[in-house]
Image (spheres, helix red, strand yellow):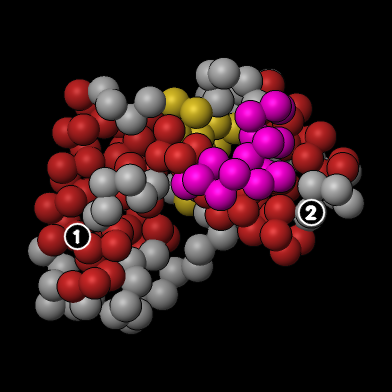
Amino acid sequence: MNLFVVDSNFFIQAHRASYPIDIALSFWKKVRQLAHEGKIISIDKVRAEIVKNDDELTRWVNGNLPDTFFRSTQEKSILDEYRKVVNWASSKSGHYKQKAIDEFLEFDKADAWLIAWCLVSGDQIVTQEVSEPNRKVKIKIPDACQTFGVSYLNMMQMLRHLGVSF
């Protein structure tokens, strides 16, 4: 079974906008359950983006997700795919502004790493980003996914696919 690999914005937007931890208890209980059932995972780079804020979301992540939830990207097969993503993004200077490419390729940013992970695993990325192929100032995950044939969907699509209700 392919897994759903969640982007940082899965957690951050839910916490800050739609499902605050102190109000939407059933949402966060369901996320915890899906993580413990192994239906959703993420990568170490996503964890780093979340915990840098040292806030309520950081405490929730540290206290509720299994130790195996955030997977290491430091494996040779993932590094090999990451190089392909880097080469692709670097070749897009005729379309994207250099700042957009540099941001997408920042070593500690999760976006390119998520794509590399899914190229190896065959998993699907869950992101709240929306494709904007004509945008010049930001490389969006869905646009990079389309280039590499990586499947992606948003949070609600994933929840529907899993038959989740709360």
Q: Is residue 125 left or right of residue 117?
A: right
For the C terminus, the quadrant is top right
> The disc labelled 1 sits on which kind of residue?
Ala
Question: Residue 73, percent across and down?
Answer: 33, 30
Residue 45 visible to an observer of this rendering: yes
Q: Of residues 28 and 85, which is closer to you in this image?
A: 28
Q: Which tag, 1 or 2, sits closer to the chain's start?
A: 2
Name the secondary structure under disc 1: helix
**The residue under label 2 is which amino acid type?**
Pro
Task: State yes or no: residue 128 in magenta.
Answer: no
Task: Tally the numbered discs.
Answer: 2
Q: Is residue 3 visible?
A: no
For residue 12, above or below residue 41 = below
- The disc label shown at residue 66, or none: none
Look at 85% across and 48% down and name the residue there.
22
Q: Is residue 64 above or below residue 9?
A: above
Mark 1 surroundings within 10 Å by alpha-carbon count, few (fewer than 14), some (14 through 19), many (20 or more): many
Residue 20: image tag: 2
Left or right of 20? Residue 86 is: left
Q: Residue furthest front?
A: 54
| Stretch in magenta | 49-64
Residue 24 location (% of width, % of height): 86, 49
